[in-house]
Amino acid sequence: MFEKTIEKWLRESATFPLPVIADIQRAARTGIYDIRGFGAKRHMPTFDDLVFLGASMSRYPLEGYRERCDTSVTLGTRYAKKPIELKIPITIAGMSFGALSAPAKEALGRGASEVGTSTTTGDGGMTPEERGHSDKLVYQILPSRYGMNPDDLRKADAIEVVVGQGAKPGGGGMLLGQKISKRVAEMRDLPEGIDQRSACRHPDWTGPDDLAIKIQELREITDWEKPVYIKVGATRTYYDTMLAVKAGADVIVVDGMQGGTAATQEVFIEHVGIPTLPAVRLAVQALKEMDMHRKVQLIVSGGIRSGADVAKALALGADAVSIGVAALIALGDNSPEYEEEYRKLGTSAGYYDDYQDGKDPAGISTQSDELAAKFDPIKGGRRLANYLRVLTLETQTLARACGKSHVHNLEPEDLVALTIEASAMAKVPLAGTDWIPGNN
Amino acid sequence: MATHNIDLEKTSVRDINQALHELNGTEDRSEWRITNSKGRHAIAVGIDAPLSVNIEGHVGYYCAGMNKHATVTVNGNCGPGVAENMMSGMVRVTGSASQYAGATAHGGLLIIEGDASSRCGISMKGVDIVVNGSVGHMSAFMAQSGRLVICGDAGDALGDSLYEARIYVRGKVVGLGADCIEKPIEDKHRAELKQLLDKAGITDCDAAEFRRYGSARKLYNFNIDNMDAY
Ligand SMILES: Cc1cc2nc3c(=O)[nH]c(=O)nc-3n(C[C@H](O)[C@H](O)[C@H](O)COP(=O)(O)O)c2cc1C
């Protein structure tokens, strides 16, 4: 029947392409907006739009596998008595217990610890599994303060005050009732099975001046031992960075708009915030203008997938990066081995983004004991460690090619941009020119 | 038992907090008297021992924050966030308290003999708060559990987006927030109220004079029919 009607070219509308039509139909059918996990799926300028120049007549490369290229990083040197020493500049981002299963959190700890890096709690508090298997654990203080308590605060190696997240700057969270198991409910002091809102504003401070005093309190409680990070979603990054420095941060975490989430409205994920690429540059610019670059460390996240992304973030001036979705994929998320189950959920390996749903066949973004039992934290941890090693090796490869004996010696001068947009955002010249849009 | 006397003009907040933390995890019941507080922030935070701390004067932000087991008395007024995230023990303020008093606190008892400003008991998670005076707007916002007793009046949007916390008000309520409703007060409620008033040492309020407020539980699970409330 279909073929019969094709007597003329079927032209898809640029304004109403098929996915847009499907969205309207879904909205009309359900009366509710789409909530999902994962990060932004739209195209945007990324680190892919930059390339390294590599060594040449005027630059010496380092010998691969022979000449050392260091990857260590120390975070929290500004005020903390006990800064965090990491072997690699790639950390695991905060992902809540609640969003993720207990064995998935354990695997993140195992993988990170195996290669000498840190992992981070999330909304919902610290679990013993996670603390027990993470050599270095960053404890998040979020607006909800679910599970927040001074004992866990003292057990942490660093404290991260979450102001915002790249996937939803200015938004709170919602853990849907189907993921509120007895254990999650108890940790959050709420009844089982109800939707849990995570507030979008902190309950006991407003604005950077208050935050400075809040941080003073956290330092007093923990005797000034622990680095205090401030995490912001990338928006007004230049000013946010300056205000975070003023508020007394040891470390600033800037999360770009493509950063992952466990459950956010699609409209929020795709339409709020700026990409990671301009955010790194803005944060570094602010730090340099305040003479705080490398004194207050900068962690960048949002869409980091490869050693190339890591190396480019560092070259633009970040001290470290953080990964969320990529770490979950390394654990086994979206693996083809679950294709049959994904099909039953109306999706397919490589497309699964319903972290909010709790039905994850990989046992990662779920609170169902049955599904979580399918996930092996030891194997998952090993896969994550493998992946982190590859990221590190790739980063070193690029750094050596640019002649750097430490990955932190990478610099903007090593980069050029392939597109005018990326050039304007990263403030590195368009390849083959000495032109940076916006610079005189 | 000897009282430790600390003058904050001579000893820093850092040093007094460090000295108090040396006793964390012990059963030490010693008494500490802190003078010249002069609105300083983060005094007596992070204690984890049944100490008795008396602060003579006004304090700034977050006094007695995250307290466990200690009894902290402020003979004066408090800045924002007094007893924030308290786990246990007791904090008493003889004057009035600024915003977010008892924010996110999990346990223990917070007594404010004067008034409390806006957002008193915001996101409270199990603490009991007794305010002898009135509270400002948005008090008990998103309050999860515990009890908030207000002997005076309450400002606008009381108990907005409330979960399982129980609110008792003796005076007028300017307005209730989303999903907060008045509920019948039964004998068991009067009994718990009387117990809280007794614990707080408030003798001139009769439990019979209070009204009870709680969650209508209509916003517990997202439902498009509640659109107007979102
Ligand atoms: C499943 C999941 C749960 C998350 N939970 C939190 C959280 O509790 N707190 C937070 O600050 N960020 C949370 N995030 C965001 C991450 O910390 C991080 O900013 C983001 O994932 C980085 O981008 P990437 O996923 O592209 O690497 C979560 C992300 C995911 C994927």
Image (cartoon, rainbow, N blue to C red):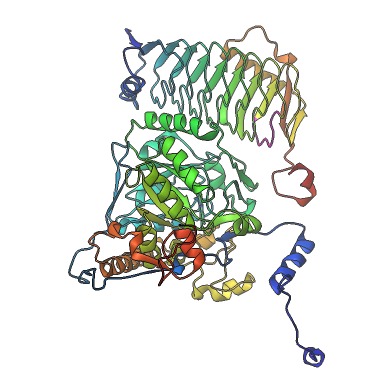
Image position of A312 (left or right of A425): left
Which x, y percent locates residue A325? 48, 61
Q: Residue furthest front?
A: A440
Percent coordinates x, y for residue A259 in the rendering:
51, 57
| Left or right relative to A11: residue A147 | left
Residue closest to the eye, A295 or A4: A295
Answer left or right for B225 relative to A194.
right
Residue A367 visible at all = no
Residue A251 pos. (x, y %)? 38, 44
Q: Does residue B198 show up?
A: yes
Within the image, what quadrant is residue A341 found in? Answer: bottom right
**Between A284 and A378, which is closer to the camera in this rendering?**
A284
Q: Quadrant of residue B192?
A: top right
Residue at left 72%, top 66%?
A23
Quadrant of the snapshot with the N terminus of chain A: bottom right
Q: Is residue A91 magenta?
A: no
Q: Quarter holding the C terminus of chain A?
A: bottom left
Image position of A410 with respect to B130: above or below:
below
Left or right: A88 with respect to A36?
Answer: left
Magenta stretch: helix, strand or loop mostly? loop
Exactly how many numbered labels are in the figure?
0
Which region shows up in magenta?
B158-165
Q: Position of residue B148 (x, y in %)?
A: 63, 24
Q: Residue at x 52, y 73 (%)?
A: A338
